[in-house]
Image: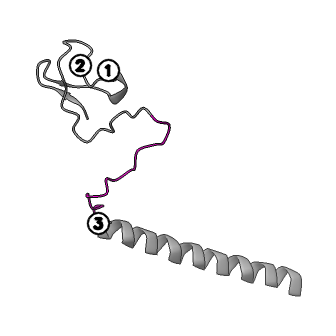
């Protein structure tokens, strides 16, 4: 989030002027981790080349495994249900 030290507040990225100044006081703002506006039409990368992505939290991995097991079980129930309807 862009931060203006003069105004002592956060700014939304679209409200910051193209030259990186605060719309209220006109001073240069600290961009923080906001994307820098570019002149070309190519979008900026989500993560800088020199910056590592944070690791995936363990509880998100556990949730994904639980969802995969649940959906696999429900798919197996669906196959059994179809087999019973077609076979009997």
Circles 3 and 1: CB atoms closer than 8 Å:
no
Circles 1 and 2: CB atoms closer than 8 Å:
yes
Q: Position of residue 72 (x, y in %)?
A: 59, 78
Helix, strand or loop status at disc 3: loop
> In this rendering, would 38 be left or right of 55?
right
The residue to which callout 3 is attached is 55
Give the mark nearest the N terminus, 1 or 2: 1
Q: Position of residue 64 (x, y in %)?
A: 44, 69
Helix, strand or loop status at disc 2: loop
Determine the residue positioned at 21% across, 38% down: 32
Helix, strand or loop status at disc 1: loop
Q: Position of residue 59 (x, y in %)?
A: 32, 67
Image quarter of residue 65: bottom left
State the quadrant of the C terminus. bottom right
Residue 59 seen: yes
- Image depth: mark 2 or mark 3 in front: 2
Image quarter of residue 54: bottom left
Q: Residues within 10 Å of mark 1 (few under 14, many from 20)?
A: some
Residue 88 seen: no
3D distance between C-alphas at marks 3 and 1: 33 Å
Which range is magenta?
40-55
The residue to which callout 2 is attached is 22
On residue 88, which mark appears? none
> In this rendering, would 78 be left or right of 49?
right
The residue to which callout 1 is attached is 17
């Amino acid at each position: 989030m862009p931060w203006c030290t003069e105004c002592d507040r956060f700014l939304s990225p679209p409200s910051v002027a193209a030259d990186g100044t605060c719309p209220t006081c006109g001073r240069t703002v600290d961009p923080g981790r906001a994307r820098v506006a570019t002149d070309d039409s190519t979008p900026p990368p989500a993560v800088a080349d020199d910056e590592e992505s944070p690791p995936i939290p363990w509880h998100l991995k556990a949730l994904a495994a639980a969802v995969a097991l649940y959906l696999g079980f429900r798919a197996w129930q669906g196959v059994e249900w179809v087999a019973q309807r077609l076979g009997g």
